[in-house]
Image (spheres, grey):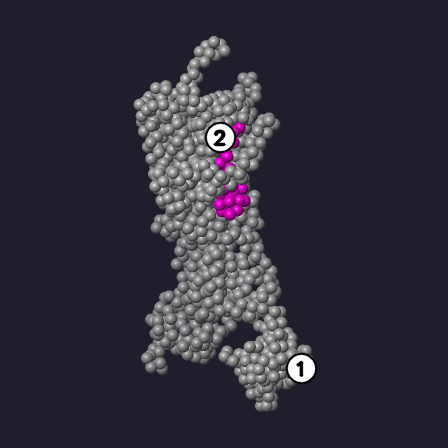
């Protein structure tokens, strides 16, 4: 580990903390449905959408209606993308003349982008036409992210409102978030990327003469526009197969930093918005502190492991850290940081290959996802997932102050506990269940590249990434098979919507409750004790559930590595 | 019945033979699946134990029979320890109920016939609502009811444990009588107000036996959490065989079973109902009957306490502390008149006036002259006095004295008297005006004496986030002064029952939970509206019906302790849940390496406790998991230590003890058990 490396990591966190409140304020304005300076330009556009769709944005919805409209919206979009991908061969915008996708690959990819996962079973630029990328996929980059933020707003309203039946209007939330947050930032961000050398063109292949005199065809496309929202919306599906390790997606050290910042930007901001919504920004800072502690712990482990490298290679005379699968342009610190950021945040973009990390260095990204992507997390999804853990933490420990547990003024009772447990149980059920299934079925066993614990990690990582809606791949796993495409598609769908629906039910129930004023006897949900408790609950619940799988995967792998046996 | 008092004392040992032996018997009866299923975690444990018993006979694996036999035994013991904890808690209540039952069995009634003179002797169980019964000296009152005629002193020790008799009379707030109490003088006629089997005594028996016990809201929520955790761990353990097969091995079912049982929250599940029963029981020992567990929980959540001034904040009786004469009258003159008017007044206030006059002015009066004519105090006139030697001395409420002597118009003396009485009120006192033959002499300063230590109690309550509101019939000036002296947060002066009800509603609209106590019939609506309404046992039947708790000692101060007991109940549940969950970490470190070491020998490094052998590690974890239950039974029954303090420090303390303690204790416990198991050669 180097001083420079730590400077990058801590500077990165400091930058984000400085941006938290401004972003939070902006989001809070939209949460409240108030005007922003951008309304002058975009206000008519917004109203135009409502008019076109026949929606009255002032009519609020109860949680059931909110959930139903959200599901219909997402299901329709998924069907649309499925159709685009299947019909790619006959649609325009296909300079390479690529064929349509197979049913199982189209199914997998459509779900993947609808659920903000962006798991890529396909080969990026070599499978997708420009039209498919822009219309079929980028649309989800915006709308799945907007859906996530809208859902977080709905849950915030549940906590903030008193004796109310409604939790907002889904259409208004999605439209506003897209128009006033995602679109403007993406435009500016894309322009910055273009200035940094990221291509943005409708042309296909460019032939260049290399220094050695050989001819090389370089594939170009509308990269910058997809790149911006890919990070900002924690989508992670790159234009190129190599994702952010590709110089056209991520050309410089500055773009690398900007990419990492943009992954976390909205996630950090939403914590402040939450605090403000419930009337005390310190509540938001407490949540953010717990997340940052978990994040920094993860970075420290991964960075230390990668910097130390593999003793097997040291024996062979290769000194230094583990550079396998990493871009020399970024080095160990920036790669380790990127890997933890992208897995903590449900983004899934990669600037290095996680499969090539040391065992424990790779364990951190895996564990981050198994916790349900709640360490900062995907836009919206991170904080609503974390708040589910907060509900359980309040319930377990809250009784210890001798009162019915309360969180930000709402009593946490049987209904909340039941629904939170239900939502959280989806993670082990899908991750462990499908991994176990694939560990015994021949179709499953055909997937992993490696044998032994590392191969097991590959399967485990794939399902974890899918259920957590992360989308990063451990590589090594041949996932483009009907078996994996189908099962991973189901895992992504369940991992997103089977958590969202109980979460919205909690929001609806909380909104209807009375407000319980805080007193000296209330369970304190700001301050160090609460932050420690949150970290503890997340680690214990996550750790206890996934320890057996981790023991047989990365931990066994690690032990084999340090004992000098290469798996 | 005298021993009732002792049997309710709080120092009673937990593990005496008369409690433990029947509890052991009952713990086997509770293995009935229909009863077990009410506790899902223990049901799963029992199902796994049953499965392992079957596999012990027919199963095929590499494990030794001795190891598996021990495993099965400990699995069953885990279940039995759980049913034992519940049985023991119930048993403690049953012992108390037995004496009440004996009382109930011997009840007979003298039911009056239509003419109201003749009566038939009938068993109490045949009485109907509306029947009139005659109760004579030394009779037990056969049913709950209202006195319709007569006055009697009644010994209510059977219910309250208090042997000093109380007066019960027709009309007013002291008309309610309770079945099983004994009339010790005079005779009364009682109108039956409850159906047989639904009276106070029946309810009390049911309560202390825990027969009617229903899960409280928090208990339901906690049970759901435990079920959720059980499901999550079922998934975690159930998928291991799949993982193991990838690694080219298999894990014996016995070991998976052991892992599952140690991970699911058996500790808190086993103790959960015992904690609830014991919480109610503590209240009963404290001579407060809660009509439901929900009420006890609500007590812990209370945000606002409405406390009656008299008896709770001040000692019941006001003391005369000063004579304030109007100009033209000497204090001595006033004292003389006040003394005369108070000689026949046997109330503590009256006695204190006599005492003050003697101390201040050394007035030596043997007693009232023989020809003195006493004018008794009535609620209508609010004046008492005496006619002696042709002159009339009046003493009473200022307004009443002024009204009674208003013939002379608004005199200078009247104006001055008002000023004096205002001063007295502002100083927290109650003025009592004195007039001699229509001439206003001045006022006596009656001082409310705030109870010693009550200010500190309110300070504690404030630290706990509980607001105190003093309820008094005094005027606002007096109330403000006493409120300031006692350190309450707020007060409601000249409070009518409607005011109380409105205050409660207002607080509840703001999301706060309110507790109050009351005794009169006009308190009933407020008692019913309050989240915790403690009715005094001396109160009317209506009040006792409306409240969700009844204080058998009729001590309004106990409201504060009731809140403490409610909090203690919730804290005990939370502490043991946290402890139970934290325990899992150590159990993982015992079982995971033992389980997987055959697949990847390198995983032996996770065996941080350096346990003897894989078998010993698994056995030690399951033994620890079982024996921790009886070890925690005393804590579950007694409740965790409770001291009033703010939530922050309280949480820090409990997290350190039960959270960190829960993490560390099993590492030590399992290591010790492992050494014993290894030493005895059990594995």
Q: Residues within 10 Å of mark 2 (few under 14, many from 20)?
A: few
Q: Is residue B318 above or below residue A116?
A: below
Image position of B197 (left or right of B473) = left
**Magenta stretch: dominant SS?**
helix
- Dots 1 and 2: beta carbons under 8 Å? no
In the picture, the quarter occupied by the N terminus of chain A is top right
Q: Is residue B625 above or below residue A212?
A: below
- Which residue is rendered at x = 39% and y = 27% of the image? A134
Image position of A516 (left or right of A496) = right
Q: Specify the segment rendered in magenta.
A: A257-285
Give how far across and how far down residue B667 sits, in percent: 53, 40
* Cα distance in 3D space between marks 1 and 2: 93 Å
- Which residue is rendered at x = 52% and y = 69% of the image? B494
Q: Is residue A259 visible?
A: yes
Chain of the residue on which disc 2 is drawn = A
Give how far across and how far down residue B309 sits, in percent: 55, 67
Depth check, front residue: B611 or B86: B86
The numbered mark at residue B328 is 1
Depth check, front residue: B251 or A209: A209
Q: Is residue B385 magenta?
A: no
Q: Residues within 10 Å of mark 1 (few under 14, many from 20)?
A: few
Location of residue B134 by image quarter: bottom left
Depth check, front residue: B533 or A493: A493
Q: Nearer the viewer, mark 1 or mark 2?
A: 2
- Which residue is rendered at x = 33% and y = 21% of the image? A99
Chain of the residue on which disc 1 is drawn = B
Q: Is residue B199 above or below residue A9?
A: below
The numbered mark at residue A188 is 2
């Amino acid at each position: 580990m180097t001083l420079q490396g730590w400077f990058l990591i801590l500077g990165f966190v400091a930058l984000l903390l400085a941006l938290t409140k401004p972003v939070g304020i902006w989001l809070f304005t939209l949460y409240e449905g108030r005007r922003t300076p951008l309304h002058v330009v975009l206000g008519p556009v917004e109203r135009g959408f409502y008019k076109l769709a026949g929606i009255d944005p002032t009519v609020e919805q109860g949680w059931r209606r909110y959930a139903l409209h959200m599901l219909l919206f997402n299901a329709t979009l998924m069907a649309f993308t499925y159709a685009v991908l299947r019909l790619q061969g006959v649609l325009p915008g296909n300079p390479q003349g690529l064929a349509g996708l197979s049913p199982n690959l189209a199914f997998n990819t459509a779900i993947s982008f609808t659920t903000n996962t962006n798991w890529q079973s396909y080969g990026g630029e070599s499978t997708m036409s420009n039209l498919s990328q822009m219309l079929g996929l980028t649309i989800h980059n915006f709308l799945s992210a907007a859906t996530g933020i809208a859902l977080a707003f709905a849950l915030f309203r549940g906590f903030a409102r008193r004796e109310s039946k409604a939790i907002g209007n889904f259409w208004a939330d999605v439209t506003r978030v897209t128009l006033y947050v995602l679109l403007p930032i993406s435009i500016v961000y894309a322009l910055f990327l273009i200035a940094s050398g990221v291509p943005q063109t409708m042309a296909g292949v460019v032939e260049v003469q290399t220094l050695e005199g050989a001819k090389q065809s370089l594939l170009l496309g509308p990269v910058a526009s997809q790149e911006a929202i890919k990070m900002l919306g924690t989508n992670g599906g790159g234009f190129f197969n190599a994702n952010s390790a590709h110089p056209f997606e991520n050309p410089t050290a500055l773009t690398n930093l900007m990419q990492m910042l943009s992954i976390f930007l909205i996630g950090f901001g939403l914590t402040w918005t939450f605090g403000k919504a419930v009337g005390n920004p310190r509540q938001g800072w407490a949540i953010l502190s717990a997340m940052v502690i978990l994040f920094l712990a993860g970075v420290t482990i991964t960075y230390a492991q990668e910097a130390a490298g593999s003793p097997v290679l040291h024996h062979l005379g290769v000194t230094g850290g583990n550079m396998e699968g990493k871009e020399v342009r970024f080095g160990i610190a920036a790669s380790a940081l990127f890997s933890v950021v992208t897995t903590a945040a449900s983004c899934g973009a990669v600037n290095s290959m996680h499969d090539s990390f040391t065992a424990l260095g790779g364990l951190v990204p895996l564990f981050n996802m198994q916790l349900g992507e709640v360490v900062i997390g995907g836009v919206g999804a991170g904080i609503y997932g974390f708040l589910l853990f907060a509900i359980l933490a309040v319930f377990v420990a809250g009784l210890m102050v001798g009162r019915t547990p309360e969180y930000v003024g709402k009593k946490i009772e049987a209904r909340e506990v039941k629904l939170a447990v239900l939502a959280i149980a989806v993670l082990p059920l899908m991750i462990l269940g499908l991994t176990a299934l694939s560990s015994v079925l021949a179709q499953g066993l055909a997937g992993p590249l490696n044998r032994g614990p590392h191969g097991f990690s590959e399967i485990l990582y794939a399902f974890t990434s899918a259920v957590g809606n992360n989308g990063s791949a451990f590589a090594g796993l041949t996932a483009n098979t009907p078996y994996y495409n189908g099962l991973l598609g189901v895992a992504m769908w369940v991992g997103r919507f089977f958590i969202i629906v109980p979460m919205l039910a909690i929001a609806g129930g909380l909104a209807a409750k009375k407000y319980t004023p805080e007193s000296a006897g209330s369970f304190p949900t700001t301050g160090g004790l609460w932050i420690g408790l949150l970290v503890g609950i997340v680690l214990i619940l996550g750790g206890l559930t996934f320890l057996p799988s981790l023991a047989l995967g990365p931990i066994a792998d690690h032990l084999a590595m340090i004992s000098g046996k290469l798996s | 019945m005298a021993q009732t008092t002792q049997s309710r004392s709080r120092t009673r040992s937990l593990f005496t033979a008369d409690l433990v032996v029947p509890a052991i018997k009952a713990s086997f009866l509770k293995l009935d699946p229909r009863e077990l299923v009410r506790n899902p975690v223990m049901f799963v444990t029992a199902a796994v134990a049953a499965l392992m018993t079957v596999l012990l006979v027919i199963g095929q694996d590499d494990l030794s029979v001795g190891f598996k036999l021990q495993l099965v035994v400990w699995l069953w013991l885990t279940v039995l320890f759980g049913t034992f904890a519940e049985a023991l808690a119930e048993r403690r209540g049953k012992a108390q109920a037995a004496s009440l039952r004996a009382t109930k069995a011997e009840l007979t009634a003298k039911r009056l016939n239509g003419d109201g003179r003749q009566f038939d002797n009938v068993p109490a169980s045949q009485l109907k609502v509306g029947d009139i019964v005659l109760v004579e000296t030394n009779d037990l009152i056969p049913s709950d009811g209202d006195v319709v005629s007569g006055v009697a002193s009644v010994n209510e020790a059977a219910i309250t444990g208090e042997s000093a008799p109380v007066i019960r009379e027709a009309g007013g707030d002291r008309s309610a009588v309770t079945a099983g109490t004994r009339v010790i003088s005079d005779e009364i006629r009682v109108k039956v107000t409850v159906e047989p089997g639904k009276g106070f005594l029946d309810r009390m028996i049911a309560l202390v036996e825990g027969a009617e016990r229903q899960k409280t809201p928090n208990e339901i929520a906690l049970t759901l959490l435990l079920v959720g955790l059980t499901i999550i761990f079922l998934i975690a353990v159930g998928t291991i065989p799949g993982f193991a097969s990838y690694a080219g091995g298999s894990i014996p079912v016995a070991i998976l079973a052991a892992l599952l049982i140690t991970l699911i929250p058996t500790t808190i599940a086993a103790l959960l109902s015992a904690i609830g029963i014991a919480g109610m029981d503590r209240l009963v020992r404290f001579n407060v009957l809660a009509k439901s567990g929900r009420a006890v929980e609500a007590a812990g959540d209370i945000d606002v306490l409405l406390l009656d001034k008299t008896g709770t904040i001040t000692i019941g009786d006001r003391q005369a502390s000063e004579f304030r004469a109007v100009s033209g009258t000497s204090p001595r003159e006033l004292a003389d008149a006040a003394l005369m008017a108070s000689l026949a007044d046997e109330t503590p206030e009256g006695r204190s006036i006599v005492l003050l006059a003697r101390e201040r002015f050394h007035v030596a009066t043997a007693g009232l002259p023989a020809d003195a004519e006493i004018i008794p105090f009535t609620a209508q006139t609010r004046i008492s006095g005496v006619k002696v030697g042709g002159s009339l001395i009046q003493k009473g409420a200022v307004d009443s004295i002024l009204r009674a002597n208003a013939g002379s118009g608004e005199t200078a003396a009247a104006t001055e008297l008002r000023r004096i009485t205002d001063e007295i009120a502002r100083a927290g006192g109650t003025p009592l005006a004195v007039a001699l033959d229509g001439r206003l002499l001045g006022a006596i300063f009656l001082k409310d004496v705030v109870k010693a230590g009550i200010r500190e109690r309110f300070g504690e309550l404030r630290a706990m986030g509980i607001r105190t509101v003093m309820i008094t019939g005094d005027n606002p000036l007096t109330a403000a002064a006493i409120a300031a002296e006692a350190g309450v947060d707020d007060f409601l002066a000249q409070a009518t029952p409607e005011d109380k009800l409105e205050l409660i509603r207002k607080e509840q609209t703001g999301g706060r939970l309110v507790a109050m106590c009351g005794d009169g019939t006009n308190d009933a609506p407020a008692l019913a509206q309050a989240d915790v309404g403690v009715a005094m046992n001396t109160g009317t039947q209506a009040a006792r019906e409306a409240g969700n708790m009844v204080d058998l000692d009729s001590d309004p101060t106990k409201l504060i302790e009731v809140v403490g007991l409610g909090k203690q109940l919730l804290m005990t549940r939370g502490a043991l849940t946290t402890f139970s969950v934290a325990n899992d970490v150590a159990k993982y470190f015992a079982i995971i390496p033992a389980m997987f070491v055959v697949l990847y020998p390198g995983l032996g490094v996770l065996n941080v406790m350096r346990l003897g052998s894989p078998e010993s590690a698994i056995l030690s974890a399951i033994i620890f998991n079982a024996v921790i239950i009886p070890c925690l039974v005393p804590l579950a029954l007694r409740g965790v230590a409770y001291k009033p303090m703010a939530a922050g420090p309280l949480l820090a303390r409990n997290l350190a003890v039960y959270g960190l303690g829960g993490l560390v204790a099993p590492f030590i416990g399992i290591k010790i058990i492992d050494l014993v198991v290894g030493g005895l050669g059990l594995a």
